[in-house]
Amino acid sequence: MTWTIDDVEMSSRLVMGTGGASSLSILEDALVASGTELTTVAMRRFDAESRDSVFTMLQRLGIRVLPNTAGCYTARDAVLTARLAREALETNWVKLEVIADEDTLLPDPIELFAAAEELVLDGFTVFAYTNDDPALAKRLEDAGVAVVMPAGAPIGSGLGILNPHNIETIVSRAQVPVILDAGVGTASDAALAMELGCTAVLLASAVTRAHDAHAMARAMALAVEAGHLAAGAGRIPKRPLALASSPFDGMLAAQ
Amino acid sequence: MTDHEHSPTIVLNGARHELPGATSALDLIADVTGRELNPDGTPADGGRLGIALAVDGEVIRRGAWSDCTLADGHTVDIVTAVQGG
């Protein structure tokens, strides 16, 4: 039931982001409740006034960090951010995020691909946040990224999985793990991602901005596990009309 | 220091920052973070620092901080992990 990246075995298929929580203590509680073993952080200028360190907290909790390049609009900025993250956090893993504009926060395919190529050559294990585009996903895989991460819907939108057919197509053609990233609003979205065959689900806002982050974290953990089990269990085919589950033989007939 | 020599001024994380004199990247990071560092850039307390540094857009590896002398006009960025993603 585990999945593996670079020989690192993980049991939880829920990758949590740390963004959106109103405090570190709420975040910590949600992370623990989610059972996540991998969580994203952003890289920003050091602020001496800010005494609370998310990095220190994650070390204490024993959760692996996946630095991201959130906020970068160009391959150049994303590559620099990834290199800074590698140096600061001592990991080759990076969630590559190169956005096109601040309204949609959707990936810029051209810059994303250029950055992916450069980072792969530089020895990074690239988790590429991408559009739900099967063609681009395949190109990223061919460029050597370790994980393809299509968006279900724009970041923070909570709209769920807008194009499940594309996600299914990406999964069916991928030789690398596919992680549904962004757009998850509630537990059924996470379950659907897993039912479509994703290896894992990455989410943040759905938990950290929920009214009860702890309860939603738990819900997501269960949904991801349920969806993964269901995907492997082999669902019944959909049919237009009913198929009785009770036998008709031996029916009583009223006089 | 003679009169015509002034303290080097760098741009640190987007703001002007005057250095007390010849300062290495290692000195600056120790000063900014308030942590004592070994010459190889690791914290003296044995923990992890979680900090990276770029000078004029180029990442300086931790082991090279002590040899990196900051000069007038350098743009220096010191970054760390924050909540996100």
Image (cartoon, coloured by chain):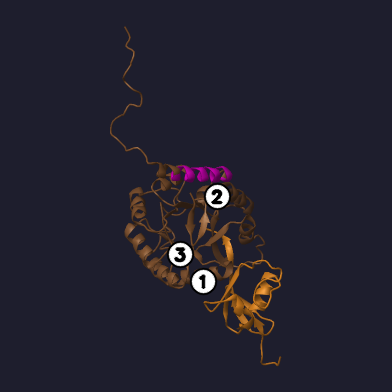
Magenta span main SS: helix
Q: Is A215 included in the stretch rendered in magenta?
A: yes
Give the chain coloured orange: B
Q: CA distance from mark 2 to mark 3?
A: 25 Å
Foreground disc of the pair 2, 3: 3
Mark 2 to mark 1 CA distance (whole Å): 28 Å
Crowd rating for badge 3 (residues with CA inside 10 Å; few <14, some 14–19, many 20+): many
Check whether the beta carbons of the residues at disc 2 and disc 1 lie within 8 A of each other: no
Q: Considering the image in quadrants, where does the C terminus of chain A appear?
A: top left
Respond whether the residues carrying marks 2 and 3 are from the same subunit.
yes
Residue A83 tag number = 1
Identify the element where label 1 is drawn: helix
Q: Residues within 10 Å of mark 2 (few under 14, many from 20)?
A: many
Magenta stretch, residue numbers: A213-228
Q: Which residue is mark 3?
A: A126
- Of the two numbered discs 2 and 1 in the rendering, the one whose residue sits closer to the viewer: 1
Near-viewer residue (B73 or B39)? B39
Count of labels shown? 3
* Chain of the residue that carries numbered disc 1 in the rendered image: A
Q: Which residue is mark 2?
A: A208
Spatial CA distance of label 3 from label 1 is 12 Å
Q: Is residue A20 in view from this perspective?
A: yes
Rendered brown, the chain in question is: A
| Image spot of residue A122 (x, y percent) | 46, 73
Residue positioned 42% across, 64% down in the render:
A145
Q: Earlier in the sequence, mark 3 or mark 1?
A: 1
SS at badge 3: strand
